[in-house]
Image (tube, rainbow, N blue to C red):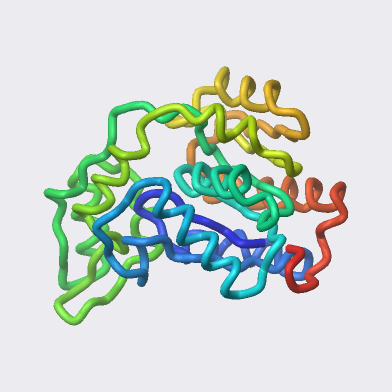
Amino acid sequence: MLAVHGHFGSSRTFASLAHALAGRVRVTAVDQRGHGHAAHRDDYGVDAYVADLAAFVRDRDMAPVVLYGHSMGGVVAFHLAARHPDLVRALVLEDAPVVVEPPVLDTRPWTRRTATLMDLGAAVIGEGIPDPAYFLEGAIRYPDGWGLPFDHEGVFRSEELLLGEYWTEWLAVRCPALLMHGTGSFVLPTALAREMAERRPGTSYVEFPGRGHWIHDDDVAGVASAVTEFLGAAGLTSERRGSS
């Protein structure tokens, strides 16, 4: 299973989930452009992310692959499945919206470097983020100090470019899909999540009552169980290369 993070994340976002799935599902994670250790780019449109992901899958001979996408990563994942069905065997979407609306989080003024990881966490909290864990999961120790794992300017552009609705792409997906939704999410309203599941045939739907946008952090055991059950029903829990 190839895991694709959302805005402000990195491949390390899925470390706990990969551990929870160990022995059942082999997880590979990717750093998307402008995130983690991936290069910063000028183009942060959806098409660029999709092209990157398609190249990643092809270059590593992973097709057809099970794609796991969180938030923006899920939007990229279902675009890939719609445009390149030969590359995707199944989709697992974690709180990935088919309609992306404002506001966006502007991290451009945020502190770029601090002396310690603790200082970086305090800086994130100072920006009004009560729990900085998601931002710190992929924190990098650069030569000039600790920093967050993303291109501040580029990711802001990426957030703005993602705004819009993607029903055409979502409904064009033909592979099996699991949509997981936290009812406390501020990104994907519950009514919209249910509509996504109802309108697209072949969509399994699991709600996590009271959980937020980062379900893999809020309830990693529950996410692992839902993923395993979905892949098992589809005959995809084997760790054979190219399957999951």
Relative to the observer, which residue lies in front, 2 or 229? 2
* Residue 160 position by quadrant: top left
Instruction: Give residue 126's position: percent from left, percent from top.
Output: 18, 47
When the figure is inspected, residue 125 is found, relative to residue 149, above or below; the finding is above
Instruction: Give residue 51's position: percent from left, percent from top.
Output: 47, 57
Number of numbered discs: 0
Is 234 on the left-hand or right-hand side of 105? right
Instruction: Give residue 195's position: percent from left, percent from top.
Output: 62, 20
When the figure is inspected, residue 84 is found, relative to residue 120, above or below; the finding is above
Q: Residue at x 83, y 66 (%)?
A: 238
* Residue 151 position by quadrant: bottom left
Relative to the observer, which residue lies in front, 205 or 122? 205
Relative to the observer, which residue lies in front, 230 or 21? 230
* Residue 18 position by quadrant: bottom right
Quadrant of the drawing holding the C terminus: bottom right
When the figure is inspected, residue 145 is found, relative to residue 107, above or below; the finding is below
Quadrant of the drawing holding the N terminus: bottom right
Q: Residue at x 23, y 66 (%)?
A: 147
Residue at the far bottom in the pictured view:
143
Q: Residue at x 57, y 18 (%)?
A: 191
Is 129 on the left-hand or right-hand side of 166? left
